[in-house]
Amino acid sequence: MTHLLTEVSPLISLQFRFPPVHFNSTAFRAHKFYCRTVLSNLYGATGTPGGDPLINQHTIRIKLSFMKSLLLIMSLVFLGTLAGMAQNVAINNDGSVPHTSAALDIKSTNKGLLIPRLTTAERTAVATPAKGLLVFDTDTSTFWFYNGTTWTNLAAGASFAIPFTANTVSATDVFSLTNNGKGVSIYGRNDGGKAALFVNTNPTNKDSNLVEVITNGNGNVGDYRYGNASSFVVDNTNSVAAAVRGKVNTIFGNFGAAGIFGESAGTGGVAGLFYSSNATGNGNTLVAVNEGNTNAIVASAKKNGNGIESTVYGTGNAVYGFVPSFGTGSAAKFTIQNDENKNDVINVSTVGNGIAGNFKVNTTTGTSAAVKGEVNSIFANFGTAGVYGVSSGTGGYGGAFWATNPAGNGPALIAVADGNGNGITANATNTGDGVETTADGTGSAIYAWTPAFSQGRAARFVNFNTGNINAVLTVETHSTGNLAIFKTGDPGPVNVARINNAGKGFFNGGTQTGGADLAEAFDVTGDISTYEPGDVLAVATSKDRAVEKSTEPYSTLVVGVYATKPGVLLTEEHIDSDLHDKVPMGVVGVIPTKVCGQGGAIKRGDMLVTSSIPGVAMKADTNLVKPGQVIGKALQDFNADGIAKINVLVNVK
C-alpha cells in the first residue's frame, strides 16, 4: 500500500521507505498527526487521512521551494520514531528512489552537501566525538574525521594541505602512489631540514619493517648506478657526509641487530658491495671502527666458502693488518675453536718466487720473536710441533735460520727443552746425515758443552740397531792435523791424550783396557770353527805365520792360548781388515786356559805344559821341563776328571 502526499515544487523530492507498520498503533498515529499538522501549517493543505491500516511501502513526495525544503527537512528530523523505522532515504529532484545500499541517497546536478563548518579550536573542543564524525575545518580548509582515537585530515582533491598530519589504523596501504612513467613517484626536498622522516614509535612492532624498498627489475648490467632498489648519493665533492647512515641503539648483539643489514637470498649476488670507482682516489672502500670491546668486522661462512676473501690487482697487500703506535693489541690472530677440526689454522701459499710468509720485528731494542709457534699437546707425534717446516720438492730446506749481521753475536738457532725431551732431534731417512754442520770461520762445526750446574754429557753417540755394523762415530781429517785431542783441567785445561793423523794414540796417563792379556791375530790350519777360546796353540808346521792346536805333551812349539778377551790385540792387518778368520792368540796376561789331570792335580803356581789332548794343558813335571815348553803358571787349583778352564798367567818360556 502506498500513500502519497504531494505539493508541487520543481526543486526537491524526498522519499522515505518504511517497513510494514500498522496505522492503528498509537505511536504511528501520533507521527501521522504531527506530519499533517506541519504540512498544513506550511502549505495550507493536508494529506488524505485514513486508508489501508497496513502499509508495506510508504512514499512521501514533497516538492517544495528551497527554503520550504529546509524547513521540511528540519521538521522531519524530529520524527525520531518514524525515521528510526525508515530503511533508506533519497533526496533528489528527479523522483528516483534511494539506492538499496544507501541509508541516505542525495542526488543533484547543480548543488552540493554542506557539512558543518568549524574552526580548528571548535573542532578539537567537540566533547566525546563519535567515531566517524565528519566536519570541515575552516582554518585548514580541509575535511576532518574522527577515527575513534584522533582527528584525521582528509586532503581535498589530489594535493596535500601543508602542513599535513594524518593518523589511521588500517591493514591495507594507507598511502599509495603509482607512476608508470619515468618520473619520480615521490620527491622530497628540504634545503634546511630532512627531506623525509620515518619513525616507528611502537616498541612491540616487530613484524613489519619501518621502510621497505622493493624492485622487480633486472638491474642495469651496463651501468650499476641504475636499476637498483634504492640509490643514495652525496653529490658534493667537498662533502664529508655519508650517502647512507645506519644506526642501531640496542643492548643486544643478536643477528640482524645492525646499523646496516644486507641479505643475498638468491643463488647469486652479494649481501654487501662497496666499490671505490675513482681510479685516482685514495679513500678506503670500507672502513669499520668499533669504539667498544668487540670486533670491528665479523665474517662467517657456514658452508664451503671463505669467511673473508681478499684480492689485490696492484702491488699492495691482499690483507694488511696493523696496530697503530698507540695500540697494544695484535695485528692478526687466527684461532680454530672446534677440537674436531683438523684443518690448518692458517694456510699461506705462493706460486711465485717470493716468500710465502715474512715476519719481522723491526726494532733494534726488541726482545720478541718474529715468529712464535706453540703446541700444547700430550703427544709427541710427528708434526706436533711449534713450528713445522716441510720441503716437498727435490730441493729446498724444511727450515733455514740465518744470522745475517757479520757483527752479530747471536746464534742462528737455539733449541731448549725444559722437559725430558731433546733440544734437537734430527733424522735422515735415506743417505743424508741427521745433522750436518760447517764452520766457515775459526769456530767449531759442533760445539757441545754442559754448563757448570749440569750433570749431563756434552755428547753421546749410540747405535741401537744390532744389525748396523757401521761405526757409531767416524772422525776424519784431510790435513796433517790430529784426528782428536783430549783435554782436561779446570780452569785451564791441558792436552792429556791425542790421536794423530796416522792413527797413533798418545796418552799422558797411560792406557787401561777391559781385557787381561796381550794378544795377536794369527791364521790357523784347518777350519776356524773348530777353534775356541782357551785352546792351547802351537806353531803350525804346515803353514807360515799360522798356529794350530797343540797335539803332544811337553811340546816346544807351544806359543800361547786362544784369548777370551784380549786387552790389546796386535795385528799386521789394516784397522779396517776383517779378522773373523783369525784367532787372537794371547801371549802375555791372564787367560782362561783348557787343562786336564794327565800330569796330576794342579795347584796354584804350578807350571803348565801341553798334554797329549789337542789344545789342552797339564801340570808340568819340573824334572822333565825343558826351555820353551812352559805355557805359564796356574792361578787356580784343578783336581777333577775331564777338561776344564782355569785362569793361567800365560808367559811362554
Image: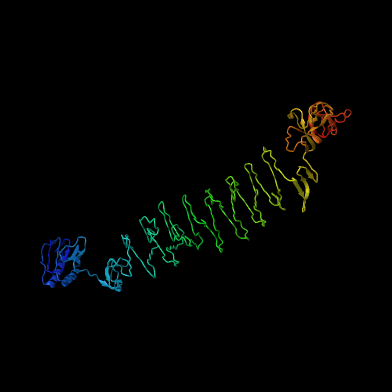
Residue 480 lies, in percent from the top left, at 75, 45
Q: Is residue 420 above or below residue 570?
A: below
Q: Is residue 349 visible?
A: no
Q: Is residue 476 left or right of residue 146?
A: right
Q: Quadrant of the N terminus?
A: bottom left
* Of residues 482 and 73, the one drawn nearer to the viewer in this rendering: 482
Q: Is residue 578 above or below residue 84?
A: above
Q: Is residue 610 above or below residue 103?
A: above
Q: Is residue 215 left or right of residue 287?
A: left
Q: Is residue 105 left or right of residue 407?
A: left
Q: Quarter-wise, where is residue 243 in the image?
A: bottom left
Q: Is residue 72 above or below residue 57?
A: below
Tell me the residue at 17%/66% (across/down).
92
* Of residues 303 and 242, the one drawn nearer to the viewer in this rendering: 242
Q: Quadrant of the C terminus?
A: top right
Residue 263 lies, in percent from the top left, at 42, 56
Residue 447 lies, in percent from the top left, at 70, 50
Residue 431 lies, in percent from the top left, at 64, 41
